[in-house]
Image (cartoon, rainbow, N blue to C red):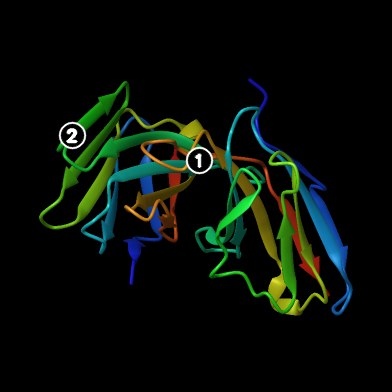
Amino acid sequence: GEDVEQSLFLSVREGDSSVINCTYTDSSSTYLYWYKQEPGAGLQLLTYIFSNMDMKQDQRLTVLLNKKDKHLSLRIADTQTGDSAIYFCAERNYGQNFVFGPGTRLSVLP
Amino acid sequence: EAGVAQSPRYKIIEKRQSVAFWCNPISGHATLYWYQQILGQGPKLLIQFQNNGVVDDSQLPKDRFSAERLKGVDSTLKIQPAKLEDSAVYLCASSLQGGDNSPLHFGNGTRLTVT
C-alpha cells in the first residue's frame, strides 16, 4: 500500500537552513506536495513538484525530488522563527488520492 | 477568495452521543474531502466527493460515520454514536477538480473531544 514517511522532529537555529526529508512508496505518484500546519490551523499549501521534475525553487523554498529513491526534501533557506510549524509531505497518485506523512515538527531556536 | 469554512471550531461530547460538522468549500471547487487528523499524525482521508457524488469512502467507518453533500456545495459529516477514539481534528478540504494538479485547500478544522 501507499506509505509516506518523515522524521518527526527537527531543530535549527534562526538564520540557518532547514532540510526536511520525506520518503514515499508509490511509484505512480504524479505530484508531491509540502504543506505547513501552524497550531490550531488547517494545512497550508507551501509548494508542489511534478514527478518528472528534479528540483523546484520558490523564494526561500527549494524542493528536491529523487524519483529513483522515492525521496523528497524541502529546504528552507534563512529559517525564521515564523517558520516553526509542522510540515507535511503528501503524494498524489493516479487514483487522485492524497496520502500524507506523519509530519515533521520544525523548531527554530533564536 | 474566501477559504474553506468549517464549523464549529471545537466540540466536546460524551461517548455514545452524536455530533455533526459542517463545511463550505471554496466557491467553484467541485471536489470536497473530509480528513481525520489524530494528534501527532498526518490527515487520513475519510471521504471524497466530486460534486454531490461519492468518489471514495473506503476509509469511512460506515457503522458510525456518515457524510453528505446534497447540492454539490456544502457538506456535513456526522458521527453517531461517538467513541473515545474519534477524538481528533476533522479537516475539510476542497480542490478545483479531482484530476490534474489541483492542490487541496484546507479549512481550519473542527477539534472534537469525546469524553
For residue B78, above or below residue A30:
below
Q: Residues within 10 Å of mark 2 (few under 14, many from 20)?
A: some
Q: Position of residue A17 (x, y in %)?
A: 28, 35
**What residue appears at the point 32 percent right and 52 percent down from the top-left corner?**
A94
Q: Is residue A56 left or right of residue A106?
A: left
Q: Is residue B67 left or right of residue A79?
A: right
Name the residue nearer the viewer: B72 or A50: B72
Q: Secondary structure at mark 2?
A: strand
**What residue appears at the point 43 percent right and 56 percent down from the top-left corner?**
A100
Task: Give the labeled residue for mark 2.
Answer: A55
Q: Where is residue B39, by image quadrant?
A: bottom right
* Label 1: chain letter: B
For residue A81, above or below residue A69:
above
**What residue appears at the point 27 percent right and 52 percent down from the top-left corner?**
A29
Q: Which mark is residue B104?
A: 1
Q: Secondary structure at mark 1?
A: loop
Q: Which mark is residue A32?
A: none
Q: Is residue B4 left or right of residue A100?
A: right
Residue A110: in sight, yes or no?
no
Name the residue nearer the viewer: B51 or B111: B51
- Amino acid type of disc 1? Leu
Q: Which is more foreground, mark 2 or mark 1? A: 1
Q: Position of residue B84 (x, y in %)?
A: 75, 78
Q: Residues within 10 Å of mark 1 (few under 14, many from 20)?
A: many
Name the residue nearer the viewer: B73 or A8: B73
Mark 2 near mark 1, Cβ–Cβ under 8 Å? no
Q: Position of residue B91 (x, y in %)?
A: 64, 51
Both marks 2 and 1 on one chain: no
Q: Position of residue A63 (x, y in %)?
A: 25, 37
